Image: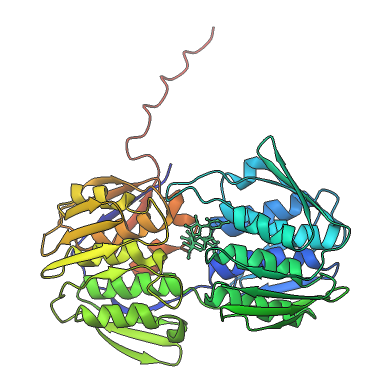
Amino acid sequence: MDKLVIRGGNPLLGTVRISGAKNAALPCMAAALLTDEPVILENIPQVRDIETTRKLLAAMGAEVELGYGRAHHRTTICARTLAAPEASYELVKTMRASTLVLGPLVARCGRARVSLPGGCAIGARPIDLHIKGLERLGAKITQEHGYVEATADRLKGAEIVFDKITVTGTEDLLMAATLADGETVMQNCAREPEVADLAALLNAMGARIQGAGTSTIRVKGVAQLHGARHRIIPDRIEAGTFIVAGALTGGDLNVAGCDPAHLTAILQKLAETGVKTAVKADSVRVMGDQPLQAADMNTEEYPGFPTDMQAQYMALATQAEGTSIVVENIFENRFMHAQELVRMGANIKIEGRRAIVRGGTPLSAAAVLASDLRASASLVLAALVADGETIIDRVYHLDRGYENIEEKLKLVGAEIRRVGDIFPKRAAAPARNSV
Ligand code: EPZ
């Protein structure tokens, strides 16, 4: 199992380039199920979740090419025949976002059998709102043996109001509604940029969607969709993570190839802590030459401060002067990184959904354990400023959503390397010469 070894203390200097957004690429890959023509997606990040989605689509019978040559990070998906409109537990348990195939499969094939995702490190992660929405569109749903089975001759447009704002719930039903008979109006939708990016692809495929990116989305169903080519938006969470890294290490880091319009809440909160940035059309330069000041932070749905940046912000708060109250409003168990930060010397007290972070505590290197994707990022950030050499285990969590993070960090001055088992198993005794 790979580990990252990071020696702290180096300011990050230079330019880092942001990859395509994992959380836009995943629904866009699922959208290819809605047509029997090829869908070409560019700027695909080379991360584990994309490979998992490739396997998922191929298992259904789709042809999936995935290439990361120098010129392009591209996938071409052709779901001409879908022999098995299913998502197995083996794959779904490794990636909850696999449930994004539910809506497209019911819409395209009239049936779907998708494993219930089960919980994960950060929370229960139910999909009840996906199911309720599909029932509103006329699907018949049964749940048994840990699977959801959905059938519909043809989905029918309907009014849907989400009880809670759900990102993949909005995306799942948006995809289903594109092939429904009649108009669908969805309210209390997620407004994340990844939803708007998915809608841009779907409209390029012939869908008739208005309002994506706002809380009310209207979809006029069509009989079929055709192929399209689409470039995935930059990853706003990767960009936010590197901006925090530049600030934390007292560096001067140009975060290039991002979309600052997706970073407003993050940049505003960092400005409150005294972080200086210079924003251009597709880059943010962060200058960490100012002492950090504590600032309270609440995670909210977009355009509020993203929950996917909470762990990274907490790492920054441990170094800010003063006490920061961090409130996690989206997931019920997303403070797993806190105890690992405490082991590195941070002063953090958890009270339900609140974390009280008393800053100004020097961090010292330790052997720490990654528990989920963004918790891993938080530990990398802490290690970049810790005194000594930190070893982060279970970095497969990190590999799910960050492309080549050690190369990107090394290029801007971090002392970081990836190793296999640090304490290699003792080599087997040499075989005795058989006589
Ligand atoms: C998406 O997850 C992202 N994943 C998550 O990013 C992100 O943290 C999350 O949105 C919130 O922004 C992808 O886009 C692939 P939700 P999603 O449905 O859609 C509850 C990362 O690090 N809920 O918006 O699964 C749910 O329990 C990942 O890249 C229901 O109750 O999140 C949560 O409390 C982690 N019933 C809240 O809604 C449902 O049917 C928001 O969840 C669905 C959700």
Residue 297, by quadrant, is bottom left
Closer-to-camera residue (207/211): 211
Q: Give the quadrant of the C terminus.
A: top right
**Is residue 60 among what the camera can see?**
yes
Q: Residue furthest top?
A: 435
Looking at the image, the residue that sits furthest to the bottom is: 280
Residue beneath the point at 76% across and 63% down: 137
Residue beneath the point at 51% across and 45% down: 119
What residue is shown at x 47% (from left), y 84% (from top)? 259
Spot occupied by residue 250 in the image (x, y as percentages of width and height): 19, 75
Horizontal side of 104 relative to 399 (left or right) equals right
Residue drawn at x 68%, y 63% is 66
Camera-side residue of 405 and 243: 243
Where is residue 80? Give x, y as percent: 87, 62
Q: Is residue 399 left or right of residue 73?
A: left
* Rendering quarter of residue 188: bottom right
Residue 296, image x and y in percent?
23, 70
Colour convention of the picture: rainbow
* 99 lies above or below 265: above
Quadrant including the N terminus:
top left
Q: Is residue 79 left or right of residue 364?
A: right
Q: How many marks?
A: 0
Q: Position of residue 55 (x, y in %)?
A: 68, 51
